[in-house]
Image (cartoon, rainbow, N blue to C red):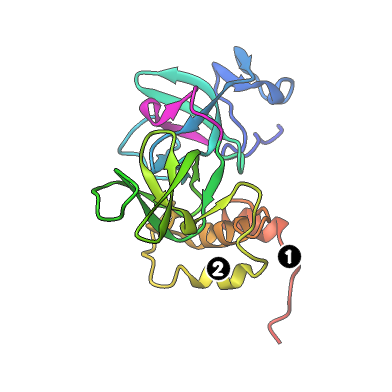
Amino acid sequence: MNALPDRRLNAFRPDLAEEALRGTVPAEHYVTGTPALVVQPVVALRPRPDAAAGIDTELLFGEGVRVLDRAEGWAWVKSDFDGYVGYLPEMALDADAPAATHVVAVPRTFAYSGPDLRTPAAFALSIGSRITAVGESETRGTRYLTLASGQSVVASHCLAVGERAGDDYVAIAGRFLETPYLWGGRSGFGLDCSALVQLSMMMTGRTAPRDSDMQAAGLGSPIERA
C-alpha cells in the first residue's frame, strides 16, 4: 500500500482534494481553489477546523492562499508562500484585497491610525507582512506609507516588494534575539526554530521549507561535528 502524501503540503480529505493530487489520492471531488489574501496581522493555521487544535504554523498579513473549501466559518487553504495546508478563520481572508507593494522589514512595527506615531496604533505587523501603499506623507521628519485601508506605517520599516533586506540571513536571524519561542509561531511576536530559519532566509530573497525535517532534507549540506 502506497503511503499518503505529507498532509502538511498536500490538501486531501475523503471528500475533497486539490487538483494536483488527482490520480494520487482518492477523493470525491478535486478543486484548484480560489485566491485570497490574509487581512489580519497574524493568523494561526491549524490541522483541523477547531480553535482548540494546536497551531501548525502561522500566516502573515498580506500573504496569499488558495481557498479550497469554506464551511462553518472556517476556510481550508494552501499557502502560496510555502505550500502549507490547514484551516484558518474565514474572516481572516479577503478575496478582493489589493496586491502588495511593500514588505515589513523589521521584526515588529505598528500601523497607526494616521501619518504620525503619536496617533493611536490600529494594529501591529510582523516582519514579512505584505502591505499595500497608496501614498506617502511626512510628519516631523518621519516618512509614512499610507495603506489602502487608511492606516500609516513608518516607511523606513518597509521595503518595496522584490527588494531584499541584505544577503546575510544570519544577521537577520540575530534581530530576533529574545523573541519569545512559540510552537508553530512564525512572526516577530513569537516563533519556533524552523520559522527563524525560514523568515531570516525569506528576507534575503531565499526560500526555505517551513518545518525542521523539511529543512534538514532540503537545505544546505551535511557537516561533520569536527
In this image, 18 relative to 100: left or right?
A: right
Tell me, yes or no, if residue 34 can be seen here. yes
Residue type at mark 1: give it. Answer: Gly
Q: In which quadrant of the rendered image does the C terminus lie? A: bottom right
In this image, 31 relative to 157: left or right?
A: right
- Relative to 173, say whether 194 is above or below: above
Residues 206 and 30: in front is 206
Extreme residue in the top direction: 28
What is the count of numbered marks? Answer: 2
Is-magenta flag for residue 15? no
Q: Position of residue 220 (x, y in %)?
A: 73, 65
- Relative to 161, say whether 87 is above or below: above
Question: What residue is drawn where x is 49% and y is 34%?
Answer: 86
In this image, 67 relative to 55: left or right?
A: right
- Rendered image quadrant of residue 146: top left
* Earlier-in-chain disc, 1 versus 2: 2
Q: Position of residue 92 (x, y in %)?
A: 39, 31
Residues 11 and 189: in front is 189
User: What is the crowding at mark 1: few (fewer than 14 residues within 10 Å), some, or many (at least 20)?
Assistant: few
Q: In which quadrant of the rendered image does the N terminus lie? A: top right
Residues 175 and 50: in front is 175
User: What is the crowding at mark 2: few (fewer than 14 residues within 10 Å), some, or many (at least 20)?
Assistant: many
Extreme residue in the bottom direction: 226
SS type, badge 2: helix
Q: Give the residues in magenta.
A: 85-99
Is-magenta flag for residue 93? yes
Question: What residue is drawn where x is 62% and y is 67%?
Answer: 169
Residue type at mark 2: give it. Answer: Ile
Tag 2 residue: 172
Mark drawn on residue 220: 1
